[in-house]
Amino acid sequence: MSALVPGVSGTRFAARTGGGRQLAGTGTLLRLALRRDRALIPVWVAIIALMVLSMPTSLGSVYRTAAERADVLHTMNTNGSMRALYGPVFADSLGALTAWRIGTFAAVLAAVMSLLIVVRHTRDEEESGRQELVSAAMVGRRAPLTAALLTALVADGVLALLLAGGLAAQGGAGALAFGIAVGGAGAVFASTAAVVAQFTESARLARGGTAALLGAAFVLRAAGDAGTGAGSSALTWLSPLGWVGQVRSFAGERWWVLLLFAAAVALQGAVAYGLAGRRDLGMSFLPSRPGPATGRLGTAGALALRLQRGSLAGWSAGFLAAGAVFGGMAEGASDLIGDNRNTLDIIERMGGRSGITDAFLATMAGMLGMIAALYVVQSVLRLHGEETSQRAEPVLANAVGRLGWAAGHLVIAFAGAALIMLLGGLGLAIGHGRDVGPLIGACLVQLPAIWTLGGVAVLLYGIAPRAAPAAWGTAGAALLLGWIGPALKVPQTVMGLSPYGHLPKLPGGEMAWPPVLTLTLIAVALVGAGLAGLRRRDLSA
């Protein structure tokens, strides 16, 4: 028998059954999940691993002597803004500098990968109705959740092994500690996503809620590290991202910190399992509110805005805050670089030869532009999500054409990219304290490259919807090339494969209109070809 849970709409207690029955079919579902993610997981793991494993070579070419590395350690630990971004440095070896420089960002990417995997194989399956069909077979109540968590753990485990093996030359113990810490951060947010998925009926809200918690963890770590020098604060210990640095890889490893990751995964996993057994399939502990009796959305564009406004607001706030942080670091850039010619060369390759401060600001504007590509791809692929979940069909069954329906989402994607870059430039100006117009212009000039990558997403969705997720790969490749290419002195012919490699370096550099206009026309052509393909093909069944 089952009983209603007080205060939870449509949720019931499950009958008590044996643990074996609860997990029946887990192995089959795990193999299915790994098969479905046979492209997604390798791409994510490869991108994160390449970013990390390229760092010792990059840092070694910049800081060639022990004296230079010691100077970086001292400079970083006395610069609150830089500590907020990267965390404190605990030793001056190449391994320790690698853990400092890329550890937090690798952990964030591992967390994003893990939360996407878990939500995809839990709430996404329930929302689409596929889980109901699967559960009609010999599948235990908690088997889908277990398979989703195991899939994320497999991805995090492979990533940890790659990082440990790739960094072993810097020190075996430090490499192992670093790999486990990054993989552990991913596992923590996989279990966080499992809990959040129990509280919402929407996969979109589950992803957004977990991402918001990840953002809060980053803010806590940044606030804790900003004022502690080489020490630690209570705020740092409240964040799983802070634990990554506190493991102190390559700097007298503190192995006991790794137990925090295991404890967090176990605790959140237990909570997720308990909640999963106390609700009906497709229901949640925070059910969606019914809409008004009379609809207030009169156009497809209004519906698209309603669906994507939360994501746009989050990206806008994040870019404004990030711009302010980067702008505040600009005046200290010359102190950080000092007389290190190699570091200056990298900054000039990324930001142009217009003085250290302008080159640094141009580099930060370029980084914001590369990150904004992730927003535009996400927003474009919302069309794919609406189609595959069969929510598009009821809309198109009315007096709404395919192009009109798609245009609503594309306006949010492309105009939204302009908005977040505008706010990023405004944040840079606020943090820097001057040059509002030039800094906003430096960010807006990134738009043709952003739109080009968005156009690739539209093209893939329009002509080959099953290949649409590959748009993440193009955006990731551009980000990876822009991130590590200048440090590794990648030839300009290779850098030119990215649309960002053709943009003028502002502020400080000369404005070049031909590449800007050319990239804009390419973006328009890609969007047009994608919409033409969408108009001619069948919708996904």
Image (cartoon, grey):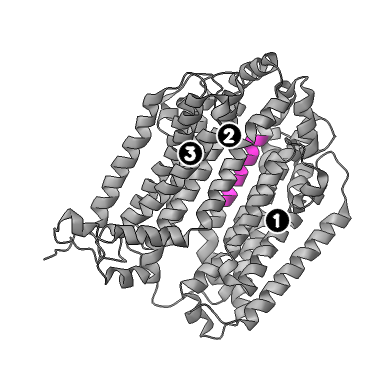
Which stretch is magenta?
315-326
The residue beneath circle 1 is 450
Give the secondary structure at mark 1.
helix
Give left or right: position of 55 versus 391.
right
Q: Nearer the viewer, mark 3 or mark 2?
A: 3
Please say whether residue 347 is one of the residues in the magenta stretch: no
**Quadrant including the N terminus:** bottom left
Q: Amino acid at mark 2?
A: Ile
Q: Amino acid at mark 3?
A: Leu
Image quadrant where residue 263 sits = top left
Give left or right: position of 527 versus 514.
left
Taking the spot 71% from the left edge, 31% from the top edge, the residue there is 330
Image quadrant where residue 533 sits = bottom right
Other-residue count near label 1 (Cα within 10 Å), few / some / many at <14 / 14–19 / ≥20: many
N-terminal of the two: label 2 or label 1?
Answer: 2
Q: Nearer the viewer, residue 330 or 13?
A: 13
The residue beneath circle 2 is 102
Q: Amino acid at mark 1?
A: Ile
Q: Are marks 3 and 1 in contact (CB under 8 Å)?
A: no
Give the secondary structure at mark 3.
helix
Q: Nearer the viewer, mark 3 or mark 1?
A: 3
N-terminal of the two: label 3 or label 1?
Answer: 3
Give the secondary structure at mark 2.
helix
The residue beneath circle 3 is 161
Considering every residue shown, the one lying at the far left of the view is 1
Image location (x, y in percent) of residue 186: 44, 43
Q: Nearer the viewer, mark 2 or mark 1?
A: 2
Q: Are marks 2 and 1 in contact (CB under 8 Å)?
A: no
Q: Tell me the distance, in whole angstroms, between the alpha carbons under discs 3 and 1.
A: 33 Å
Residue 215 seen? no
Image location (x, y in percent) of residue 244: 47, 31
